[in-house]
Image (cartoon, rainbow, N blue to C red):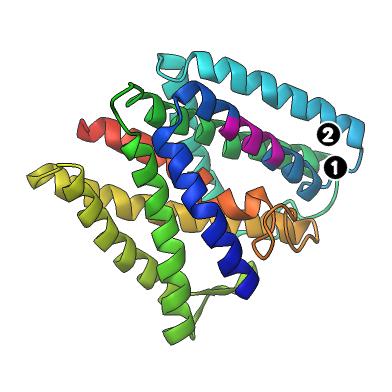
Amino acid sequence: MKQRVITALLITPLAIAMILLLPSTIYAFVIAGLCLLATWEWTRMAGMRSRPLRAVLLAVCALALLLLWDCADAVAGWIAIVTGCVWWLFALAWLRHFSWGAAPTRENITIKLIAGALVILPAWTAMMQLHRSQDSPHAWHTWALYALVLVWAADTFAYLAGRRWGKTKLAPNISPGKTIAGVYGALAGSALVALIGGWLLQVRGASLAGLLVLALIVVVFSIIGDLFESLIKRHGNVKDSGTLFPGHGGVCDRLDGIFAALPFFAVGKFLLGL
């Protein structure tokens, strides 16, 4: 826990500064780097052992990120984002049948690699759309930060509520540490953060109510994203996706909930006209 806290205290201010201050072009390179690291980790969790083949997939992912950067604000970009939302509905069904695809066969590895692309690429596109929507010399990228703060708050309140009141497990076969109380804590805490953040962003009236509903949906899917990554790790007999963040694991361990949350937030924000 001490190592986790120290790492969080070092990383969080840097992450916030990059989100708010960096131009979208530079920010895109930073996030693309994290997405490529996540892809590398995912190929290992999926059961792919050949490093040359993993490197080829990494190059394909880099090309896909470049193409999506060019169309993040266009129809093709929105298709990618909506596809990500649809994918997470399928992921929810997979969680209900957690043993499906567990055998390390070539077909199952391929399915998990495709799943990794549907996890990472739509999230990248959504983040770029959110960040670029406020890309001007006199504007901070507050909506991109807002989306991430919702997930960060959910994680924090889930941990606190689960530690204090958690008795009933949420999904013991997938992630034994998660509890029903943690889910309630995540929803309550993130709802408060959503209202305060929305007010600070000058959202009022019905739009603020809509933003609250969106925040709750986003948090639910961030939990699903966390569970799904845990499922993939269990299938691959992997404890952590990597070791980049001491006490926290790898990139996928830190971004699993964010990967699921971003497509829904981007779509919801667009529908609310914010």
Crowding around mark 1 (Cα neighbors within 10 Å: few <14, some 14 to 19, many 20+) is some
Q: Main secondary structure of the magenta part?
A: helix
Instruction: Tell me the CA gap for discs 1 and 2.
Output: 7 Å
Query: Could you say where residue 27 lies in the image, as x and y percent from the top left?
Result: 51, 29
Q: Is residue 1 above or below residue 47?
A: below
Residue that sits furthest to the left in the current view: 205
Crowding around mark 2 (Cα neighbors within 10 Å: few <14, some 14 to 19, many 20+) is some
Query: Could you say where residue 151 lies in the image, as x and y percent from the top left?
Result: 43, 54
Q: Which residue is mark 1?
A: 48
Q: Quadrant of the N terminus?
A: bottom right
Specify the quadrant of the image occupied by residue 238: bottom right
Image side of residue 186 versus residue 226, left or right: left
Query: Could you say where residue 66 lies in the image, as x and y percent from the top left?
Result: 60, 18
Asked whether disc 1 touches disc 2, contact meaning CB atoms under 8 Å apart, the reply is: yes
Residue occupying image coordinates x 36% and y 41%: 265
SS for dot 1: loop
Residue 28 seen anywhere in this rendered image of the structure? yes
Q: Is residue 82 above or below residue 248?
A: above
Residue occupying image coordinates x 51% and y 13%: 70
Residue occupying image coordinates x 32% and y 33%: 140
- Would you say residue 228 sits in the magenta stretch? no
Q: Which residue is mark 2?
A: 54
Image side of residue 197 versus residue 217, left or right: left
Q: Is residue 86 above or below residue 132?
A: below
Residue 93 seen anywhere in this rendered image of the structure? no
SS for dot 2: helix
In the rendered structure, which disc, 1 or 2, sits on the residue that comes first in sequence?
1
Q: Which residues are magenta?
A: 30-37
